[in-house]
Amino acid sequence: MRFSALKMMDRNVENFKCTAAELRVMAGAYYQTLGFGGGLDFEQFIQSRDLPVDKQDELEVRLKQSLGPQRYDDWQRGTDHDYQALTEFVSGAKLPANIAPTLFDVRRLAQREHERVVADVLAGEAARRDRLREIRQTTLEAIRTQLGEAVYLEYSQRGLASWIEELGRP
């Protein structure tokens, strides 16, 4: 469990202010995800920087269950480099602090919808392309509305809006 706690601390958690109890819960989720029974190479665990890809989703589900929805959202924001850049931008632009979480949530929802549309094997290519274009446009309008045109232009010029363009691509 101690090694699991250390691995969780390796995940850029300085912006996620967790309590000791939350760190124990997160370490427990990490420990349960890896399942230290028999087949785990402990040396690889110590040396490996990242959790194996097939275990990432499982860990996220466990963290959400363990931390609860609100703290899990705080966890996601606190460990996301894009969110950190967004909060710095919002602060520098002298916008209200609640804009950063709102924009982050818009981004997260848009990306989930993008993934859902791309994964829909029943949709035709033209329908998928149209839906992705719609997601991109709706998201762009939402971000511009939140920031205002002048601040959006600065946001875009700093390269922070590049993810919006990606929404329109399969």
Image (cartoon, rainbow, N blue to C red):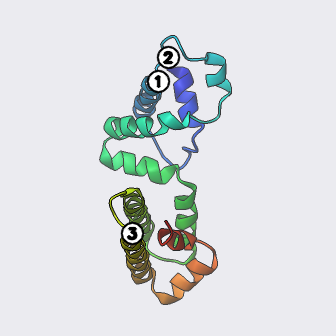
Query: Disc 1 versus disc 2: distance between alpha carbons?
Result: 7 Å
Q: Nearer the viewer, residue 116 or 160?
A: 116
Q: Residue at x 44, y 40 (%)?
A: 57
Q: Is residue 20 above or below residue 73?
A: above
On residue 134, the disc is: none
Q: Is residue 98 left or right of residue 92?
A: left
Q: Residue at x 47, y 24 (%)?
A: 31
Query: Disc 2 versus disc 3: distance between alpha carbons?
Result: 42 Å
Residue 75 in the image, given as x and y percentages of width and height: 44, 47
Which label's residue is closer to the chain start, 1 or 3?
1
The residue tagged 3 is 128
Q: Is residue 128 above or below residue 6?
A: below
Q: Nearer the viewer, residue 100 or 144?
A: 144
Q: Residue at x 57, y 41 (%)?
A: 11
The residue tagged 1 is 31
Secondary element type, mark 1:
helix
Q: Is residue 73 above or below residue 137?
A: above
Q: Is residue 43 above or below residue 164?
A: above
Q: Residue furthest bottom?
A: 150
| Labels 2 & 3 near each other (Cβ < 8 A) | no
Check disc 3 and give the amino acid type: Arg
Circle 2 packing at 10 Å, graded few (<14), some (14-19), many (20+), is few
Q: Residue furthest top?
A: 38
The residue tagged 2 is 36
Check disc 1 and give the amino acid type: Tyr
| Labels 1 & 2 near each other (Cβ < 8 A) | yes
Q: Nearer the viewer, residue 122 or 97?
A: 122
Disc number lying in front (2 or 3):
3
Residue 114 in the image, given as x and y percentages of width and height: 41, 63
Disc number lying in front (1 or 3):
3
Circle 3 packing at 10 Å, graded few (<14), some (14-19), many (20+), is many
